[in-house]
Image (spheres, grey):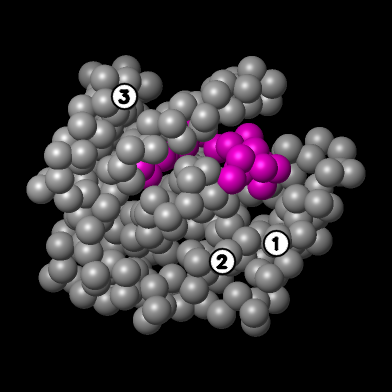
Amino acid sequence: MGKMISVVNQKGGVGKTTTAVNLTAGIGAVGHKVLLVDADPQGNSTSGFGVDKRTVEHSSYDLLTGNCRAEEAVIKTPFAGVDLIPASMDLAAAEIELIETKDRQSQLKRALARLKEQYEYILIDCPPSLGLITINALCASDTFLVPIQCEYYAMEGLSQLMATVRQIKRLYNPTLELEGVALTMYDGRLNLTGQVVAEIKRYFAKELYATVIPRSVRLSEAPSYGMPIQYYDKRSKGADAYNALAKEFLKRNKKQRKEREGLV
């Protein structure tokens, strides 16, 4: 049974999609079968894997509105171990259409349920908001991963997200847990960076990944070529960082599986 993880932060410009794309690629590159679901109307994860969202036949919009089976929306990418359910131009209208839908918070969960047997990990790239699409993703997920930019407003956004998660746990998904917190756009030369890291460690010491993602021009360039950083420039600092994050992510999950099975 595959594990489903939402990559979520309601604040835009924090490296959420960059993390979703490159963490997915890093997991796939070391031999794991992984699916990325692009649930962000901007569709940047879709273009980040070289897919034109204007030409896709089926998308995450169709899953949310019940217009197709999940298997019909899956696209095989040229990148090792990685499949994609793309976003389309229609996705922006999904939240309005969902308002009148019964059990509207569970549409994505029902749609993706049958795919959990086919993948080791399913990551969902959420919109930069706490609307119905993000709620659908969190209701479908086992855990959620939060990329945080090392800046002043980081903790404020995180506290809002955690309040939403508490509501979702209480009402819809009592087993939802925090997968981890990843620091992005890291610049160790700035005093503010150190202050933000110290503050996050106060609240999320166990969940904070040791790997940090640096500011990188190459990371910014890679999506315009339709490639994850590991394929665009495998020798870059960004590629090293996301490969290290994927390794840390997998190591944590391996340890958690052993603990559940009583092997440690």
Q: How many marks?
A: 3
In magenta segment, residue 194 = no
Image marks 2 and 3: residues in contact by CB distance under 8 Å: no
Q: Report whether 157 appears left or right of 91.
A: left
Q: Which mark is residue 91?
A: 1
The first of marks 2 and 3 along the sequence is: 2
- Check disc 2 and report its element: helix, strand or loop: loop
The amino acid pointed to by label 2 is Gly
Q: CA distance from mark 3 to mark 1?
A: 33 Å
The amino acid pointed to by label 3 is Phe
Query: Could you say which is closer to the camera, residue 62 or residue 33?
Result: 62
The first of marks 3 and 1 along the sequence is: 1
The amino acid pointed to by label 1 is Leu
Image marks 2 and 1: residues in contact by CB distance under 8 Å: yes
Q: Indicate the quadrant where residue 199 lies.
A: top left
Q: Determine the residue positioned at 51% across, 32% down.
A: 161
Q: Report whether 231 appears left or right of 159.
A: left
Q: Which residues are magenta?
A: 129-148
Q: Is residue 263 visible?
A: no
- Check disc 3 and report its element: helix, strand or loop: helix
- Indicate the quadrant containing the C terminus: top left, top right, bottom left or bottom right: top left
Q: Which residue is mark 3?
A: 204
Q: Is residue 218 visible?
A: yes
Query: Could you say which is closer to the camera, residue 18 or residue 2?
Result: 18
Q: Is residue 52 above or below residue 33?
A: below
Image marks 3 and 1: residues in contact by CB distance under 8 Å: no
- Label 3 neighbourhood size at 10 Å, few (<14), some (14-19), many (20+)? some
Q: CA distance from mark 2 to mark 3?
A: 30 Å
Q: Which residue is mark 2?
A: 43
